[in-house]
């Protein structure tokens, strides 16, 4: 190997090492800022708990403070209550989100590809999208034989729109030259869908799913007030009715942690399928 080749190889190794150091530094910075943000949130929570404890008319809610909440959370973890209350909710959200994907992605592709269908469906879909998913509760109760099915329906109604519109927007951004080249190479519509359209809009679909998951997770708790005897929403309602505010606070914390974890998984998937790379 020549001296020039050795020099080039050494430069590449140095650049790779610098890139790793920069990535590690960025990760450490993000973690530090995130930890600081959580610390500020915890301090505000503790301050609110102290204020409640010092206010005579609000002392009944003093168990919502951080210390009683975390003590009760530890007891719930030891007893296995966290999984027993979370599993039904995750099941309902999973089914609802899955059905929303099955409906929203194909419909979004059609809307993105067919201008006449986009014009025809725009007003009806925008009208339906603006209706609160919880407004469909009476219809869901009448239309479905089980509470689980009714809750899944409400989650689908909440989640389908972000997925559909994100998919349609992704399809409309596809460079027409890609489709033209694929046709010239002999690709049929199915080949174009599998090898051109879906890879091109994968990040858009995942972004829509991330948004839909956030909406579905918010809708889940009030939806689980619908007569079910399991799930995080039921646990919230039960803790409120029994005036067990430490358990209520612990359940709210569990909802937040699970929601954050699910959102983080979606974000990792989006980064995995991103065509753009960023150091930020």
Image (cartoon, rainbow, N blue to C red):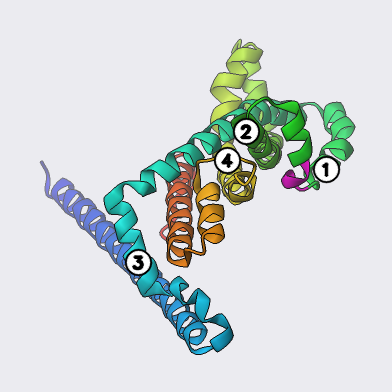
Q: Residues within 10 Å of mark 3 (few under 14, many from 20)?
A: some
Name the residue: 48% across, 51% down: 259
Task: Answer with mark 3 or mark 1, whichever residue precedes in sequence.
Answer: 3
27 lies left or right of 244: left
- The picture places residue 3, in percent across and down from the top left corner, at 12, 50
Inter-mark Cα distance, 4 to 1: 18 Å
- The picture places residue 153, in percent across and down from the top left corner, at 67, 33
Q: Is residue 141 above or below residue 274?
A: above
Q: Residues within 10 Å of mark 2 (few under 14, many from 20)?
A: some
Q: Is residue 129 above or below residue 104?
A: below
Q: Which residue is mark 4?
A: 209
Q: Secondary structure beneath disc 2?
A: helix
Name the residue: 67% across, 27% down: 103
Q: Is residue 193 above or below residue 50?
A: above
Q: Secondary structure beneath disc 4?
A: helix
Q: Which residue is mark 1?
A: 126
Inter-mark Cα distance, 1 to 2: 28 Å
Q: Which residue is mark 2?
A: 147
Name the residue: 64% across, 39% down: 155
Inter-mark Cα distance, 4 to 2: 24 Å
Task: Answer with mark 3 or mark 2, whichever residue precedes in sequence.
Answer: 3
Main SS class of the magenta portion in the image: helix
**Residue 186 seen anywhere in this rendered image of the structure:** yes
**Residue 26 seen anywhere in this rendered image of the structure:** no
Whether the magenta-drawn stretch holds residue 10 is answered as: no
Q: Which residues are magenta?
A: 132-136
Which mark is on residue 70?
3
């Amino acid at each position: 190997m020549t001296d020039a080749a050795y020099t080039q190889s050494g430069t590449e190794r140095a650049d790779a090492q610098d890139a790793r150091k920069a990535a590690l530094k960025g990760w450490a910075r993000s973690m530090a800022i995130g930890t600081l943000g959580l610390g500020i949130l915890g301090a505000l929570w503790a301050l609110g708990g102290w204020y409640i404890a010092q206010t005579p008319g609000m002392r009944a809610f003093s168990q919502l403070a951080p210390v009683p909440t975390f003590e009760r959370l530890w007891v719930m973890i030891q007893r296995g209550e966290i999984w027993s209350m979370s599993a039904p909710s995750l099941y309902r959200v999973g089914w609802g989100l899955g059905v929303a994907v099955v409906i929203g992605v194909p419909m979004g592709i059609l809307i993105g590809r067919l201008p006449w269908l986009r014009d025809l469906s725009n007003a009806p879909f925008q009208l339906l999208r603006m209706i609160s998913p919880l407004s469909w509760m009476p219809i869901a109760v009448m239309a479905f034989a089980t509470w689980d099915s009714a809750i899944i329906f409400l989650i689908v109604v909440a989640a389908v729109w972000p997925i559909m519109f994100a998919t349609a927007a992704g399809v409309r951004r596809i460079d027409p030259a890609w489709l033209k080249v694929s046709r010239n190479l002999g690709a049929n519509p199915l080949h174009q869908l599998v090898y051109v359209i879906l890879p091109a809009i994968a990040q858009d679909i995942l972004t829509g799913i991330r948004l839909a998951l956030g909406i579905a997770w918010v809708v889940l708790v009030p939806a689980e007030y619908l007569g079910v005897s399991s799930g995080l929403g039921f646990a919230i309602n039960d803790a409120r009715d029994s005036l067990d505010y430490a358990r209520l606070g612990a359940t709210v914390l569990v909802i937040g942690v699970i929601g954050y974890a699910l959102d983080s998984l979606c974000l990792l998937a989006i980064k995995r399928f991103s065509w753009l790379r960023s150091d930020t």
